[in-house]
Image: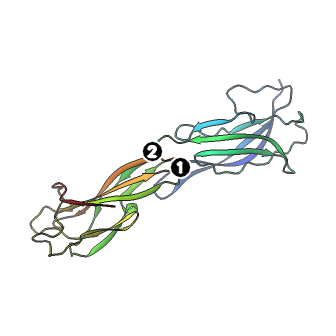
Amino acid sequence: MRHPRRLITSLLIVTACAAEESKVEFRDIEAICVEPEDSVDDDLWTCDEALVIDCNTDAVPEEIYVRPESGDCEGVDLQPVEGPFAPGTHDIVVADGDGTSVCETTLEIQDPVAPIVTTREVQLWPPNHKMHTVTLADCFEDVVDCDPDWVPELVWISSDEPDDSNGDGHTSDDVAFVASDAASLRSERQGGSNGRVYHLGFTVTDGSGNVTEGQCDVIVAHDQGKHEGIDDGEAYRIER
């Protein structure tokens, strides 16, 4: 039985991302030239067919099968198709050594799943009434999404203690937005309280428009013996 000729090309494939770094897989994809008398199995990707995959469950195939219009693979010099390929629709052009197109198809990478966000608690200490900038990057333990171009946005801030009350140093304006993904928070709590709990409400939107909503906790503990705060319920909130 005759086997199609295998020509190796390089391809960069984006598979997933983490909190501060995209997980990118480098590997080779084989462009296989198919002679007129050879057949290709139905489950393999041929260059005359568009391919649609879900980046959360599927990988770009390791092989693409090409039938040159000349019909003969002798002397065919297929060139690499350059990546990376983020979610979206890509025009795939396989060219020979002189740049002439041998075949064209499309690769559509769909992402129907919203980012998966894991948060961590942030501590402010000591309670010296100073303002501190807290970013969403400080709050995020991990963000998993196959699209590396996700965008975080801070949408609201709340506190379980009043803005100015007894035992907190007689200060006001304890919370403020300072950037699209950052807040300024005052490191203080009421002297007789069980600590102050700020909540930062956020969204994370990926390049396909999938949105995840969530919040992270910022704690000003009552004392160093227990670095924790008990949420007594929202006292006030500011929104954009």
Task: Please state if 31 lies on the left or on the right of 240 as rendered.
Answer: right
Residue at x-position 85% and y-position 31%: 35
Q: Position of residue 232 (x, y in %)?
A: 15, 55
Q: State the scheme by which the image is colored.
A: rainbow
| Along the line of sight, the residue nearer the viewer: 187 or 24 | 187
- Residue at 87 percent of width and 42 percent of height: 76
Marks counted in the figure total: 2
Picture coordinates of residue 120, whole percent (x, y): 33, 56
**Which class describes the residues within 10 Å of circle 1: few (<14), some (14-19), or many (20+)?**
many
- Check residue 114 in the rendering and tell me which mark sits there, or answer none: 2
Residue 227 location, x and y as percent?
A: 21, 62
| Nearer-the-camera pick, 68 or 59 | 68
- Does residue 219 appear to the left or right of 24 in the view shown? left
Q: Quadrant of the N terminus?
A: top right
Amino acid type, mark 2: Ala
Q: Is residue 216 above or below residue 223?
A: above
**Residue located at (20% from left, 70% from top):** 188
Q: Quadrant of the C terminus?
A: bottom left
Residue 159 seen in this snapshot: no
Q: Residue sitting at 67 percent across and 27 percent down?
A: 43
- Which quadrant would residue 3 be assigned to in this image? top right
The residue tagged 1 is: 147
Quarter location, residue 34: top right
Q: Position of residue 88 (x, y in %)?
A: 60, 45
